[in-house]
Amino acid sequence: MQPILTASQIKALDAYTIAHEPIVSIDLMERACRAFVAWFTERFNNSFTVGIVCGTGNNGGDGLGIARLLKEWGYPVRVWLVKGGAPESIDFKINLDRLKHLGGVQIDEITAAPECSIFSDEDILIDAIFGTGLSRPVEGVYTDVIACMNTARGTRVAVDLPSGFMADEPTTGPSVEARYTVSFQLPKLAFFFPSSFQYVGEWAVVDISLNKAFIRQAQTSHFFMDRNTARSLLRRRSKFDHKGNFGHALLVAGSLGKMGAAVLSARATLRSGVGLLTVHTPQAGISIVQTAVPEAMLSIDGHASVFAGAVQPERYTTIGIGPGLGKAPETVKAFHKLLENFPHPMVIDADALNILGENRELLHLVPKGSILTPHPKEFERLVGPWQNDFERLEKQKGLAAQLQSVVVLKGAFTSIAAPDGKTFFNPTGNPGMATGGSGDVLTGILTGLLAQRYDTLEGALLGVYLHGFAGDLGAWEKGMDSLIASDIVEFLSGAFARLGG
């Protein structure tokens, strides 16, 4: 599990590393430059012309060190120094002297609004004006330079952080719009938000050997999941285990015309290792579920087309509810009764969430330790609108604390908020999973894991990771454009096998 630190913590991490390794700051900067260049040279050969736009602080010092190293690799390099009143750092001056001593690199200064055509000859434009130290929106000549960079034809690559972009708060001023961002040691919190993609683009983290003990002990409530953590959560089965050891799940899903959601969710529940599965279905779904999911048992509703009741919840380890459910008045009443009568953690998704959003008096009935899995629109129905993604994150944490449950907000880097305020971002998944039924599959996976008595948070972390991993395997085999929800179920067994191997 990788902690996500604030900009001020990263500054302290740099200082701690310098003091305790020990290493002088210019050598630590050289280490960062070499890590960036290693990433860069794997992706761009030296037939590309490279322009590097530097500020006068340490981010600019990084840019000058990168310019020197790329020149030594045979890249055609040109450098611009943006001088808008910010002081020159010591390491900036050292790297400027080193670059001048190397020779062969044109270095120009920008002190006033430039003609944007100055960047037009560069295939790649590296942004090294400001890093994480920026505390307010850019202004003056920096604004003009950033505007010119954003209209340049070259591919923009940001060093550590796009200039003007804020790591820990909403970006309100102009920012470089990078195609790639290469972050040193750790990702920044804002990288995980939808609104940031315009500025950050695709991001990567390069290891520059900052002090690991400091990172482990740093206080944070934000974390980035990794494969080792997911693997550690996955339980191994013993020789004498039987189906009774893996729980009995009830899936309340489907309505007339939406039985496919129930089928997808049921298949995913079974593929997640549940011992027994019962699907509660209206009468219209009997033949569909029995044919499509022969491994599942049925609980048959008295209503022909919707969920209207007749559930005996005491028989089940956990309940997953919502996929394809609909919001008929009978369904709202039946869901209300189920919440009153089932005290154990549930997985609540789709129309079950929409019912909660429209009947907020039911929220207090959600069993503690449940998992709610809204997509952004369903989440908005639960908590109301937000001004920016940082506010959305706080609302997610607030809902998890209010319900004493885990809230899984689906999307790229799906965020998983625990009741104690900790939030985890998931690395797996791809845009091919933006297809109908994908969320129903996740509901099934989480229901299967809760039925096996996984801890709620651990089950949510593992289930979200596996869901995305299966989607990645499916996309690799079939392509993102052709991926459908059934493929995620199909590749779930491979995700379990590879994670457990």
Image (spheres, helix red, strand yellow):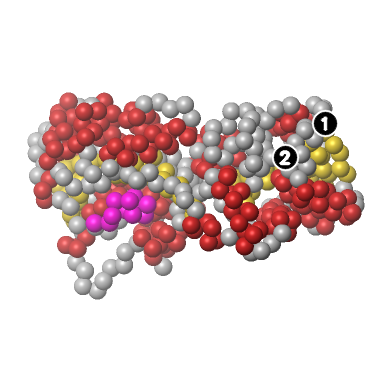
Quadrant in the rendering for residue 338: top left
Horizontal and vertical percent position of residue 232: 39, 63
Image height of 25 relative to 436, above or below: below
Residue 461 sits inside the magenta stretch: yes
Horizontal and vertical percent position of residue 501: 41, 68
Left or right side of 24 for 420: left
Instruction: Check disc 2: other Cα within 10 Å, few if <14, some if 14-19, many if 20+.
Output: many
Disc with the residue nearer the chain's start (1 vs 2): 1
> Which residue bears the numbered disc 2?
129
Label 2's element? loop
Horizontal and vertical percent position of residue 93: 81, 48
| Amino acid at circle 2 | Ile
Image height of 453 relative to 435, above or below: below
Nearest the viewer among 112 and 133 is 133
Label 1's element? loop
Q: Which mark is residue 111?
A: 1
Task: Provide the residue span drawn in magenta.
Answer: 453-463
Residue 489 sits inside the magenta stretch: no
| Amino acid at circle 1 | Thr
